[in-house]
Amino acid sequence: MTVAMEEGHVIFQYNLGSGVATMKSDNTYHDGEWHHVEVARQQRNGVLKIASETIQAESPGNVKQFSSTPETMFFGGYPGEHDYIDITNEDFNGCIDNIVMSSVAVDLSKSKESIDTAPGCPIKVASLVSFDKSAPGYVKYDSPDGNGLQLVFKFKTEEPDGLILYTSTRNQNSYLSLSLAESALILRAAPGGELTTGSYEKYNDSEWHVVIATREHNELRLDIDDFKSYAVKVAEQAVPFDGPVYFGGVPEIYNIAAAASATDTNFYGCIGDATLNSKLVNFAQSQDRFNAHLQKCPLQKSSSVFEKPSVEEVRAEVSQTFLSDGCALPVEPAQEEVPTTEGFRFDEDYSSGYGFGSKRNSRIQFNALPGSTRADFKFSFDFKTTADEGIIFYASGKTHRDYITFYLKDGKIVFSFNTGTGAALMRSEQSYDDGAWHSAVVERRDEHGMLFIDGFQVANGTGKGDSKFIDLKEPVYYGGIAAEVADVVRPNTEGTELSFNGCLRNFRLNNQRVGGSHDAYGLIRCSANVEPGIFFGDGPRANVILRKRFSVGRVFEMTLDVKPRKNSGVIASVHGRRDFVILQLNNGSVELSVDNGKGVITARYTPPSPWMLCDGNWHSIQVIKNKNIAILVVDGTSTNPVSGKIGATSTDTKNPLFLGSQPLVQKRRGGATSERFVGCIRNVTVNKELEALAYTTFVGNVNAGSCPTI
């Protein structure tokens, strides 16, 4: 017998042994409000009552009672996964109270066991909302404080049209709207005019895009993905928008100002991490919400990182893999079935597989831990990595004075905790960035802490002050931290903020597995078929912004290793108004093109075979630009110096320096190939300085933590 929710509907089911009786509400009740539910069974007859609905059903067959009475009942979820295909395996996310069974009150605080629960009913925080095409909806939010508006958010969608945001003054004489129209973003304001990203940029690619839409002072501005900006000056000052703010669309009875939006279609997709005038938008505390799904994104590929892909799914993906002509590795890396015992790899970004990318902040956020960490505790986990820095676990109180953390620093494991009056810090003497599996235990007993690795105690420490307890608040971070908390976390982690770049498994607290309700970002199953580097996948967007504003100048040198999966594609580029530098593969040849303003200078390396550089091995490339001379060195073989016109020695650029094929490179000068670079890059230096790739900006289908080798 079960009472459950699916897609907002309440469902009552039971099976006496001769078939299932099912009662399902017509209405949905996932609105954040309290609802009273009654279910009853009299022999084969059942009834479900909720609000004004009454649904009745009768079980098939002749059996009238259960053959036995269960010893245990579960509320809110089921440990692990059950095998009943008619019943959801999703745990309930919300509050339950006032349970009465056969006139007897049930006190859940006296249960035999509780996992991922908390007393009371805390205020729900929802930073993610999604809208389904089959049921258009919207979220109505309070009007923002102050003059004008600045909205910061991320979104992804498959649809070319949709109203993302609309707000106005109460009389709608002034308004602001942000829409997708024919796959372009359009920001309209009155007074103010319109900004559009144009027809070249397509934002309905099912990838996350970060947008800052601003109407402040005398300016209308759009900033997208940290490297595209559009702005126009406005004669009139921004006014306070005292009307409501709508996300995803507006109610049918609400008439927006004429021509205020570039589309009359509702938005279908996901919106997340929004702030209005620097205040976090909590979609769960909206004034009104219709057909809006909180904390779920229908475009994500898996509902839980703890699910294992079925063999059929893996084979289907493998069957679509094909080899590029003559190249040793497939354009799409081969899929493999990796045992769950191998754990998860935490990478800086990975847009396929189990998680969804948050750039260099891959992690799991747990809403609760299976045991108490207020006094004594013991965490255990296995890890392997070749990186020398990264956060393994971080949890803190509201002010981050109370905290527990363990992380990798200079290849050594560090464990620290603070009761609010002084930190205990323990550090291993040995480095463990050797790519092998290691087992770690961190333990606190009273004010003392101990760090064990591979069964040996490697460090101990003592906290300071009189406080005995550590008070933590959700969420707790595993494998990395969210970008918005990095500034307050750094003082507690010796400046470490990067996600753990490696594999983690068997995470336990006080010998209990850490699991339950969680959000996952940028995870893949751990595999032996990877190596260090950056992987650029196939698709319209896959690039890295090495420098946001880069001037090539008179002398420029760049080195890198490449392992391509196609024999054509732009490897690196930077442009100015006229000048540029482009490094690309073109039908197997390596080409360096430079323009100082007086014509293109091209150095070209042509190997014996057009497939030599995509033979599955790493190849080194060195770019040298010295005044008006260009030189290429590939695998130690140098081209002859190529000279340009005398008089122009500086390459004047001020735009980003890209690694990989940025979307607009074909529209710029330089004769870039139409093919996108697919493959791996590592060991990048610019002007003899090694690039800290983990701190750069990744766009689209880029995995910056590891390169697949299959």
Image (tube, rainbow, N blue to C red):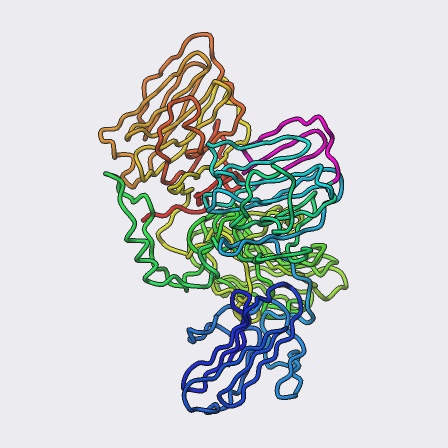
Write down the quadrant of residue 169 in the picture.
top right
The dominant secondary structure in magenta is strand
Determine if residue 511 is in view: no
| Count of marks, rendered view | 0
Image location of residue 352, percent across then percent down: 42, 51
Seen from this angle, which residue lies furthest top? 647
Q: Is residue 553 left or right of residue 616?
A: right
Query: Which sits in the foreground, 644 or 622?
Result: 644
Query: Which sits in the foreground, 394 or 75?
Result: 75
* Residue at 57% across, 58% down: 291
Determine if residue 611 is in view: yes
* Residue at 64% across, 67% down: 373
Specify whether residue 495 is painted magenta: no
Image location of residue 411, percent across then percent down: 51, 49
Image location of residue 447, percent across then percent down: 69, 65
Q: Is residue 446 left or right of residue 70?
A: right
Up the image or down, 310 lies above or below 335; here it is: below
Up the image or down, 110 lies above or below 463; here it is: below
Image location of residue 10, percent across then percent down: 55, 72
Write down the quadrant of residue 557 in the picture.
top left
Specify whether residue 219 is painted magenta: yes
Q: Is residue 557 left or right of residue 219?
A: left
Query: Which sits in the foreground, 405 or 537?
Result: 537
- Magenta stretch? 211-240
Write down the quadrant of residue 264 in the picture.
top right
